[in-house]
Amino acid sequence: MRIFFVVSALILLVSCYSFAKQEQPNILLIIADDCTFSDLEIYGGQAKTPHLRKLVSEGMIFSHCYQAAPMCSPTRHCLYTGLYPVKSGAYPNHTKAFPWVKSIAHYLQSSGYTTHLSGKTHIAPKSVFPFQYSGVDNNPDPTVFSKVVQSSAKSGKPFLFIAASNEPHTPWNRGDPSAYPPNSLKLPPVLVDSPKTRDGYSNYLAEITYFDSQVGELLDMLDKSSLRDNTLVIVLSEQGNSLPFAKWTCYDAGLHSGCVNDGRYRYIRNLSPDEVFENIMMKDPIFKEWQKMAKDGNANAKRLVHDYRHRPAEELYDTISDPWNRKNLIADESLSEICDGLRSALDNWMKQQGDEGTATEMKAFERMPRMKKK
């Protein structure tokens, strides 16, 4: 199930449910921030999530959830509008949609819903996203959710409540890291084994468990209300964490989707392969420690630092045998037919979306209000 189909799926569900029972379901959508799905224990990861585990036992779990970008703002614009980022105009980070775009708030309000977004926003302009906004420290306000539930129960008017958490986005300063002793953790193969990496990973896992407690608080309020059995609950993990080879990349750990994927093979096209990749991670103490280890002769650190900062023009990965996308198969002649098919699929998709490649990238600043002002 692709994440950007959630909008149309919810609208269809509301319509079908209305015809079937003459009663519209409430919707509680909870979103984590910068959370690699495979780090959750419900997917075999190390982060303890008892509330999510209970929720899974009562419903279903997405095993192939696709999203359109490995960054917060484009992901959220895509989720709330049902449009790919380039089509809506919201393709760089800290971005805005075109004024003509409609969001789920418009569609559900016209169906009689109240629409609320509590916590992290990272979307613009408000005319495209006419939610009722609330939040505390960039996190959902459970008090507001309680009032929305009570009001809906009394009035009979259905609600959409988006609880947009800021966790486990950096800084990783919430939760109990003592539950995750650094030396006991199993690091993903894309991370250099170093003290700062282990400490950071411990703090990150602790913050996922903190997010799980936020989920539990909201679900507890819902369970105690009369609306429990008429509320659809969805929890999404957004894109991957901010460690290397996850967020800001098109690898599986970044978004478990994007560019082109045929169900097994992932094809990635890099528009400027001659450029050295730069992002905020270059200033992070974890990455700086990697660079020092690489300079001091650590072969694994040298390889990962190089591969993270230097991307070839094309990449192809077998996501089944190589889930961390480390062995580039683009030169494998036995896969040339698959490569050609994925190249063509990407070309057609870009044409349909109005994506002109480098020319579109050069217009990215026009879609970023903060950068334009500076």
Image (cartoon, rainbow, N blue to C red):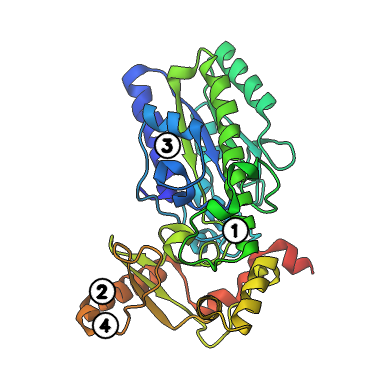
Question: Gap between marks 3 and 1, in whole Å?
Answer: 40 Å
**Spot occupied by residue 259 in the image (x, y as percentages of width and height):** 41, 67
Badge 3 density bin: few <14, some 14–19, many ≥20, Cα 10 Å: some
Q: Earlier in the sequence, mark 1 or mark 2?
A: 1
Asked if residue 77 shows in the view, the reply is no
Question: Gap between marks 1 and 2, in whole Å?
Answer: 40 Å
Say whether marks 4 and 3 touch (CB < 8 Å): no
Residue in the image at 42% along x and 36% along y: 11
The correct choice, above or below, for 131 with respect to 43 in the image is: above
In this orientation, which residue lies closer to the viewer: 56 or 106?
56
Question: Disc 2 designates what residue?
Answer: 341
* Foreground disc of the pair 3, 1: 1
Q: Amino acid at mark 3?
A: Leu
Q: Earlier in the sequence, mark 3 or mark 2?
A: 3
Question: Disc 3 designates what residue?
Answer: 10
Question: Disc 4 designates what residue?
Answer: 332
* Foreground disc of the pair 4, 3: 4
Q: Amino acid at mark 2?
A: Gly
Residue extending furthest bottom?
274
Residue 370: quarter of image:
bottom right
